[in-house]
């Protein structure tokens, strides 16, 4: 089961090693890990997606808190939150084959950020499945993917107002499904509905 | 530099280190000098701190550990960079597994040379990352005081543990202003998952009140938290029997009528039976280690469990519990006790039932059997306990003798058993016993080691001689790596591969160090030798030549249920279990 933690940590050398080493020690695989600065000076924010048993969540969180450099941990797996990942995809494309990739990019609301005689680069942001979707479509249309670089998931809990907004829209709030029913993800839902099976 | 900042005294990084340690209350350190720590050693003479020169840095970390276990203070070990630092690692891991507050200071090459594979450079903060509670590298003299103070705070706060500070040579040599007060760390951040609902206390109290067959599992936390009074109150108010973990021994007085003794792999039969038959386990400052539970699927299946523990990561780790009270044991019990009123003092059926199983074990006990002229390790432990009235500090090594000591030496007081529980580090006893003696010079200290473990760190005999420490050493010598041999006997068809071990004449080895010694072969000689050693001023070593192929019973094979123990064969006139005469 995928467990997602957001850890607020001190921005110091060695902190990433400590956090990563903790997962290694617990024999839990890290699926993705993103780190960057947070809203506070000297404090970084990590989003860690790990593949662990559902009961491991408590122990991972308790163990993370035992690290002196960890300030705050949130197990966001079960909470209503916004998830995004960014990917850069370089695809082999000649002037003849470009246009169909342009079309695809439009469907996926991706952007072409670089164009060369024999390749182009797509930038796409969204939930994991959307990125997977584009990659799959590219593969199936026999476009040759040259390089893929993905950031891994970034997660932020939704604001407290979300449930009220949903109430007003008369959409029942289901924690696990909120990703696909909340209003600001509509675009993504639409796009995913168009994806080939 | 700001005007108001110049209140401190200008000192070198090395001087700041000692000044900070002294102001933190450190009076003794254990260490070994070398190139990258020499400025620190050069500055030592100006400070009121005693340095004990060890013979191997592993000894320094075990001594700091033994010092901490015996005194409750933070033990301090110092080593140079490279091999000096790596030699500390076994001792650091030992302290980590047993939650011992310890500060290790290592020299490091100059900050400009870091990462260049300079002479005696090693990435010790990288190496010790998984075996320290926290570690730091100091590259500037102005960071020394604050880092050392923070390290001391981390080592002793919450669930204690070892902390390492790696100190580059240039930071030792350069100077900065020293202001002890200004270097104070922020208040320690308690683990955010500490605490519990009031409801949980009420629920726990209700479970305790309604339990018919409760058992208290007394762990190391009783000693670390200083919760002896509170546990005694709980026990006596409700007449609950107490089973103890290896590291919990001494936390609860062994002579108490409700003390059952040690639980687990080599626990007494009645203790493990009581746990298996129990309807409520109250775990106090213990972590349900595999050596304590045996197979988890069959562990106390009919018992509800209350877990009082300071480390949230231990909750539901091995054993699922019904109520978790996360916090300092003494504080939690203070909150729990008002909800529990004394129960009538009549002996419950439960206690009578446990007592009945004790009788069955006692008849086969070696203490109750006629003297055959053979000397058994159990005799040695029993006689040592008898001679010292259970009041000595005993440092044990790892293996058979450690278990016999735990069974036969009845510890009355906290911090009187110094032993490596979690990591099971052979070679621990001798240096740890030295550390304990340095911490408590007025106390009688016995080091008990097997012939195997003793030889792992035997070089520290020389430290005892140099410091002229009044320590008694008992070597339980059976010519084997005894516990390995026992496993080979039980589980590997008596294939004694690499377990017979040749030893020097230990009494002569002692003599070579200027330490008095004796060799003992019989029970009568044993009692006499113990008397001589206790009366002797200065160190004394006794080499007890005991029965070679004796085993520790009962024994629960790894992975078996707690009640599926291997009992002593009926026809073998040896020990069944410990029961005092």
Image (spheres, coloured by chain):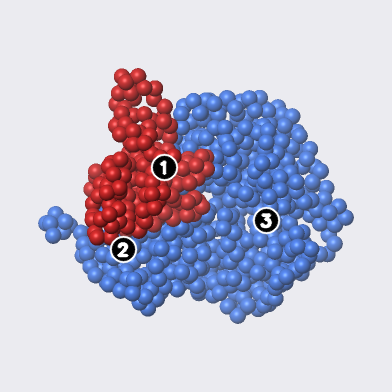
Chain colours: A red, B blue
Have a look at marks 1 and 2 and say if they share a chain: no
Q: Nearer the viewer, mark 3 or mark 2?
A: 2
Q: CA distance from mark 3 to mark 2?
A: 42 Å
| Quadrant of the image containing the N terminus of chain B | bottom left
Q: In the structure shown, which secondary structural element does the residue marked by tag 3 occupy?
A: helix
Residue B200 at x, y percent in the picture = 51, 28
Q: Confirm or deny contact between disc 1 and disc 2 (CB under 8 A).
A: no
Choose between A147 and B427: the one closer to the eye.
A147
Residue ranking furthest to the bottom? B512
Q: Which mark is residue B403?
A: 3
> Which chain is disc 1 placed on?
A
> At x 40% / y 40%, what residue is drawn?
A196
Q: CA distance from mark 1 to mark 2?
A: 34 Å
Let me know if residue A179 appears in the view: no
Choose between B87 and A166: the one closer to the eye.
A166
What residue is pinned by disc 2? B138
Residue B239 at x, y percent in the picture = 65, 32
């Amino acid at each position: 089961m995928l467990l997602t933690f957001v850890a607020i940590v001190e921005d110091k050398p060695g902190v990433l090693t400590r956090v990563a080493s903790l997962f290694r020690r617990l024999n839990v695989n890290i699926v993705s890990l993103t780190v960057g600065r947070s809203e506070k000076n000297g404090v970084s924010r990590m989003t860690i997606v790990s593949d662990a048993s559902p009961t491991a969540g408590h122990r991972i969180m308790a163990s993370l808190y035992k690290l002196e450099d960890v300030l705050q941990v949130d197990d966001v797996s079960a909470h209503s939150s916004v998830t995004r990942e960014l990917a850069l995809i370089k695809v082999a494309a000649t002037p003849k084959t470009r246009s169909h990739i342009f079309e695809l990019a439009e469907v996926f609301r991706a952007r072409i950020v670089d164009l060369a005689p024999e390749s182009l680069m797509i930038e796409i942001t969204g939930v994991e499945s959307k990125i997977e979707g584009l990659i799959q479509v590219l593969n199936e249309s026999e476009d040759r993917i040259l390089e893929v670089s993905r950031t891994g998931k970034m997660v932020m809990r939704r604001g407290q107002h979300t449930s009220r907004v949903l109430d007003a829209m008369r959409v029942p709030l289901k924690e696990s499904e909120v990703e696909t029913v909340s209003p600001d993800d509509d675009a993504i839902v639409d796009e995913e509905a168009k994806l080939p099976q | 530099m700001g005007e108001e900042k110049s209140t401190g005294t200008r000192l070198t990084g090395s001087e700041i280190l000692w000044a900070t340690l002294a102001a933190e209350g450190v009076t003794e350190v254990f260490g070994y000098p070398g190139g990258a720590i020499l400025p620190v050693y050069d500055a030592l003479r100006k400070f009121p701190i005693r340095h004990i020169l060890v013979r191997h840095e592993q000894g320094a970390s075990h001594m700091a550990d033994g010092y901490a276990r015996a005194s409750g203070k933070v033990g301090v070990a110092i080593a140079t960079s490279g091999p000096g630092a790596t030699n500390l690692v076994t001792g650091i891991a030992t302290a980590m597994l047993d939650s011992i507050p310890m500060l290790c200071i290592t020299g490091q090459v100059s900050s400009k040379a870091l990462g260049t594979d300079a002479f005696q450079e090693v990435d010790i903060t990288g190496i010790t990352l998984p075996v320290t509670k926290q570690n730091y590298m100091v590259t500037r003299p102005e960071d020394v005081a604050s880092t050392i103070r923070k390290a001391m705070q981390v080592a002793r706060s919450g669930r204690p543990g070892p902390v390492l500070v790696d100190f580059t040579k240039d930071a030792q040599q350069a100077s900065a202003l020293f202001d002890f007060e200004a270097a104070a760390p922020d208040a320690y951040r308690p683990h955010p998952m500490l605490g519990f609902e009031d409801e949980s206390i009420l629920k726990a109290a209700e479970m305790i009140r309604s339990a018919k067959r409760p058992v208290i599992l007394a762990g190391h936390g009783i000693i670390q938290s200083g919760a002896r009074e509170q546990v005694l109150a709980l026990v006596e108010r409700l007449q609950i029997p107490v089973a103890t973990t290896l590291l919990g021994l001494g936390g609860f007085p062994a002579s108490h009528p409700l003390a059952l003794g040690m639980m687990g792999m080599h626990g007494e039969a009645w203790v493990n039976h009581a746990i298996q038959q129990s309807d409520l386990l109250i775990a106090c400052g213990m972590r349900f280690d595999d050596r304590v539970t045996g197979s988890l699927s069959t562990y106390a299946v009919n018992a509800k469990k209350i877990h009082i523990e300071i480390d949230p990561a231990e909750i539901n780790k091995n054993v699922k519990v019904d109520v978790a009270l996360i916090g300092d044991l003494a504080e939690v019990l203070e909150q729990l006790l008002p909800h529990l009123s004394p129960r009538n003092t009549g002996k419950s059926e439960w206690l009578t039932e446990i007592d009945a199983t004790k009788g069955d074990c006692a008849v086969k006990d070696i203490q109750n059997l006629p003297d055959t002229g053979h000397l058994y390790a159990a005799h040695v432990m029993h006689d040592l306990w008898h001679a010292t009235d259970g009041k000595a500090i005993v440092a044990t090594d790892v293996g058979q003798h450690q278990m016999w000591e735990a069974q036969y030496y009845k510890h009355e007081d906290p911090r009187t058993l110094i032993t490596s529980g979690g990591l099971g580090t052979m070679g621990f006893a001798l240096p740890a016993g030295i550390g304990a003696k340095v911490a408590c010079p007025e106390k009688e200290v016995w080091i008990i080691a097997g012939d195997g473990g003793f030889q792992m760190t035997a070089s520290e005999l020389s430290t005892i001689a140099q410091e002229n420490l009044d320590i008694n050493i008992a070597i339980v010598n059976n010519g084997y790596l005894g516990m390995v041999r026992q496993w080979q006997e039980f589980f590997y068809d008596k294939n004694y591969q690499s377990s017979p071990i040749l030893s020097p004449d230990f009494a002569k080895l002692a003599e070579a160090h200027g330490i008095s010694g004796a060799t003992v072969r019989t029970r009568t000689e044993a009692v006499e030798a113990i008397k001589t050693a206790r009366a002797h001023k200065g160190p004394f070593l006794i080499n007890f030549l005991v029965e070679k192929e004796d085993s520790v019973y009962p024994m629960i094979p790894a992975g078996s249920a707690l009640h599926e123990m291997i009992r002593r064969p009926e026809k073998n006139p040896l020990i069944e279990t410990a029961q005092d005469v």
